[in-house]
């Protein structure tokens, strides 16, 4: 009898375990982020605000893991290898795919405006759910596909146009914050008092980035009692290696610059810095740590752009079944957790795989006054917390040069367009900031 009872109990236990195994497991939240808030967050992001994180999710605890995954497709306007802009976007796609088991990354290189639509249709036919044009001039044609493919989200980088639709999203990082920190370092490093910028062409994007760097240079000069000149010369396009080399050489030989940076995409200005034995300040990626370009005896610091932080906001919203924000303009206060657990900000100063003050070249650090090092640390910490921003803190006074926009002429030289302490709107920064700051020298 006792054996019979034991046998029945054992059978009941086995049956209970089988039933438990058949119950669906609770869905898991994708690691390292928060889901997006959809349209309300998009409106918040468009209004701006220090620390505003358009599309950052409320901590709702929603657990979502769709049965089917997503495919992120990026159309790169240039080649990937040997570039910092497309290289950073490519790395972003890879990091997204590493983070999510159910998100794939595919891409096309050297996509011009005439190819962005046909390539996008090929990518969609192959299963793409998100199609990114990583420059505005070849991202804007994707707008023509939005009605044809309402279930696909199209993304274009912002240069000056702010057109959006429910499934036509616009993104850009607040790179000027990291550029400001670079400017502090560059302004302190120069011994000749001359700093050069090899730039692409006048655009709102370029003008805004240059302004961030210039404000940092001027703050360093004021703090140290130095007279510093910043020279800008345009190559005419983003990727013109020979023209960029010629300009960098001219800046060194004719204008006696001993610190050089660029708003272009080839490594030619860095090559000139190495050859001439002057300091270089990098852009878009940690060129020493990721590419092994030169070393910290030439590269004083770079800034690193993590496009994956912006893409992650879009993907989080889509995984949650929500509409992604239409405008994302994220800065140092916004972060993403990578697959390996690393938490990274949208932008940061970086060099030889180090971040923050540690990113300053050891050779450069020896030449920097302690008050500059302390200020770099202070301003970075404040921007990480969303407590300070160079574009809010400083006045914007026109140099009388820049880019004439339809309905927005270049303000006359000496015009104070924005007073110190007033926060500019996201719309103004992204589409109307069309003048150089007073004191910049724009070379013909």
Image (cartoon, rainbow, N blue to C red):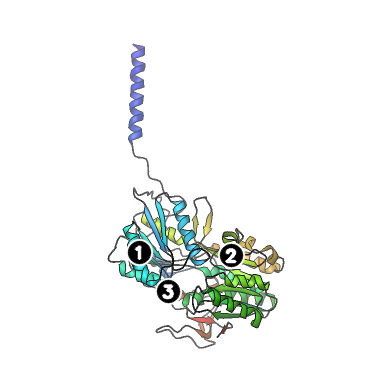
Is residue 399 visible in the rendered image? The answer is yes
Q: Residue furthest top?
A: 1
Q: Quadrant of residue 105?
A: bottom left
Task: Give the left or right position of residue 328, taking residue 11 as reference.
Answer: right
Residue 304, x across and y down, in percent: 55, 64
How packed mark 3 is, by other alpha carbons closer than 10 Å (few <14, some 14-19, many 20 or more), is some
Is residue 164 visible in the rendered image? The answer is no
Query: What is the C-alpha distance between the residues marked 3 and 2?
Result: 24 Å
Q: What residue do we see at 60% from left, 80% from top?
A: 231
Residue 413, x across and y down, in percent: 53, 88
According to the image, label 2 marks what residue?
A: 380
Q: Between residues 121 and 387, which one lies in front from this camera angle?
A: 121
* For discs 1 and 2, the disc positioned in front in the rendered view: 1
Residue 423, x across and y down, in percent: 49, 73
Looking at the image, do the residues carrying marks 1 and 3 touch, with CB atoms under 8 Å apart?
A: no
Q: Earlier in the sequence, mark 1 or mark 2?
A: 1
According to the image, label 1 marks what residue?
A: 120
According to the image, label 3 marks what residue?
A: 427
Quadrant including the N terminus: top left
Q: Is residue 30 above or below residue 252?
A: above
Residue 243, x across and y down, in percent: 54, 77
Quadrant including the C terminus: bottom right
Q: Secondary structure at mark 1?
A: helix
Q: Earlier in the sequence, mark 3 or mark 2?
A: 2
Query: What is the C-alpha distance between the residues marked 1 and 3?
Result: 28 Å
């Amino acid at each position: 009898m006792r054996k019979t009872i034991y046998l029945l109990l054992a059978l009941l236990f086995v049956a209970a375990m089988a039933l438990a195994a058949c119950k669906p497991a609770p869905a898991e939240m994708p690691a390292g982020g928060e889901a997006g808030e959809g349209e309300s967050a998009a409106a918040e992001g468009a209004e701006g605000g220090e620390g505003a994180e358009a599309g950052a999710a409320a901590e709702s605890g929603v657990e979502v893991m769709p049965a089917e995954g997503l495919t992120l497709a990026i159309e790169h306007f240039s080649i990937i290898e040997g570039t910092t802009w497309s290289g950073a976007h490519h790395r972003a796609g890879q990091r997204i795919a590493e983070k999510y088991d159910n998100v794939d990354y595919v891409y096309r290189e050297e996509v011009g405006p005439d190819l962005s639509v046909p390539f996008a249709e090929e990518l969609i036919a192959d299963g793409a759910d998100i199609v990114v044009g990583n420059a505005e001039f070849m991202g804007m044609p994707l707008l023509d596909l939005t009605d044809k493919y309402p279930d696909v989200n199209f993304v274009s980088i912002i240069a000056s146009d702010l057109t959006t639709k429910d499934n036509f999203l616009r993104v850009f990082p607040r790179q000027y914050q990291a550029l400001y920190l670079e400017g502090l370092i560059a302004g302190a490093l120069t011994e000749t008092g001359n700093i050069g910028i090899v730039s692409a062409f006048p655009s709102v994007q370029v003008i805004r980035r240059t302004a961030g760097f210039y404000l940092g240079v001027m703050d360093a000069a004021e703090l140290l009692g130095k007279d510093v000149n910043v020279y800008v010369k345009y190559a005419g396009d983003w990727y013109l290696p020979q023209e960029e080399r010629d300009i960098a050489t001219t800046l060194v030989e004719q204008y006696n610059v001993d610190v050089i940076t660029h708003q272009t995409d080839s490594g030619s200005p860095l090559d000139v810095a190495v050859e001439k034995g002057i300091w270089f300040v990098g852009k878009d990626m940690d060129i020493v740590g990721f590419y092994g370009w030169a070393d910290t005896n030439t590269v004083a610091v770079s800034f690193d752009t993590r496009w994956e932080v912006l893409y992650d906001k879009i993907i989080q919203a889509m995984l949650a079944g929500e509409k992604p924000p239409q405008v994302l303009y994220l800065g140092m206060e916004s972060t993403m957790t990578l697959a390996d657990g690393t938490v990274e900000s949208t932008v940061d100063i970086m060099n030889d795989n180090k971040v923050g003050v540690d990113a300053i070249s050891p050779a450069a650090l020896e030449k920097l006054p302690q008050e500059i090092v302390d200020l770099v640390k202070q301003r970075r910490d404040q921007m990480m917390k969303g407590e300070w921003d160079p574009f809010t803190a400083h006045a914007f006074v026109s140099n009388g040069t820049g880019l004439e926009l339809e309905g927005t002429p270049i303000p006359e030289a000496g015009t104070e367009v924005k007073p110190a302490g007033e926060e500019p709107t996201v719309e103004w920064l992204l589409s109307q900031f069309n003048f150089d700051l007073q004191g910049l020298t724009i070379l013909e």
